[in-house]
Amino acid sequence: MDYTRTTDTSAAPAALGLLDGKVAFITGAGRGIGAAAARLFAREGARVLLAARTEAQLKAVTEEIRAAGGIADHVVCDLADAAGVRAAVDRAVDLYGRLDIAFNNAGTFVPPGPMDQVTEADFDHVYAVNLRGPWVAMVAEVAAIRATAGTGAIVNNSSVGSLMGNPELPAYGAMKRAVNSLTESAAITYGPEGIRVNAIAPGNTLTEMIRTWESESPGLQERLQAHTPLRRAADPDEIAQAAAWLLSDRSSFVTGTVLRVDGGARA
């Protein structure tokens, strides 16, 4: 029998992107992990709607995606504004006729310090953005998926700081831990309809948020990397890759999980 390998691929079908044909809604898409996700999802074949508070950043990322041949638009949205969040999700359906997947990535940061030094105003703000915001978004996204695509997937961005006591960022860690609970509850509730809900828990990632934290906590990067077996921080695209997989059909039997993407820091 002739086992000669051939390099003729003329009859091979073109490879489809990981998210080919899907409509994606992404919060916090103007920078960091959200912007990386918007670029990646578009490269993988999705039509994307970017949402964030800063229009200039949204416009820049949207234009970058379009210049690379992707399909993207943007909407200004503050997660602390429930009506605005619902309107942003509806905008995805208005633009593209459906919603298949959503990445609830946006979050806010409060000054690091022990719990007794967190002001009530800061606590209320991090609650409004990091917990109530994803809850409002999920409710709107489930309704949009149910009414259009029928089935789909949602990923919430949590944090490894939600998986243990977090004395430097107690309010932030508490809200992210609550997001894990919402994720699991939503997975159980909407799984029978074919809507999967998961979360990712990034570790040390080179974003503006971590740089802000480091400016107030000198030596932070050295400490975090020393406790990470891979001995480095993640690039935002590496976190976006995990979200893309969970939103894709390749993870079709995965729901209700909080996936650590932390370089082994919690191993």
Image (tube, grey):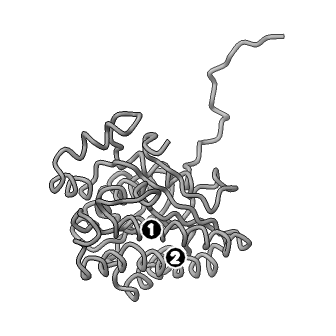
Residue 264, horizontal then vertical, whole percent: 46, 40
- Corner quadrant of residue 153: bottom right
Residue 240, horizontal then vertical, whole percent: 43, 52
Q: In the rendered structure, which amino acid carries the disc numbered 2?
A: Met
Distance between mark 2 and mark 1 Cα atoms: 8 Å
Q: Residue under circle 2? A: 138
Q: Are marks 2 and 1 in contact (CB under 8 Å)?
A: yes
Residue 99 shows up from this direction: yes
Task: Kindly identify the residue that appears in the image at 64 percent across and 50 percent down.
Answer: 250
- Corner quadrant of residue 190: bottom right
Task: Kindly identify the residue that appears in the image at 60 percent across and 75 percent down.
Answer: 145
* Neighbourhood count class around disc 2 (C-alpha, 10 Å): few under 14, some 14–19, many 20 upward: many
Task: Kindly identify the residue that appears in the image at 33 percent across and 49 percent down.
Answer: 205
Q: Which mark is residue 135?
A: none
Is 31 drawn above or below residue 143 in the view shown? Answer: above
Q: Quadrant of the N terminus?
A: top right
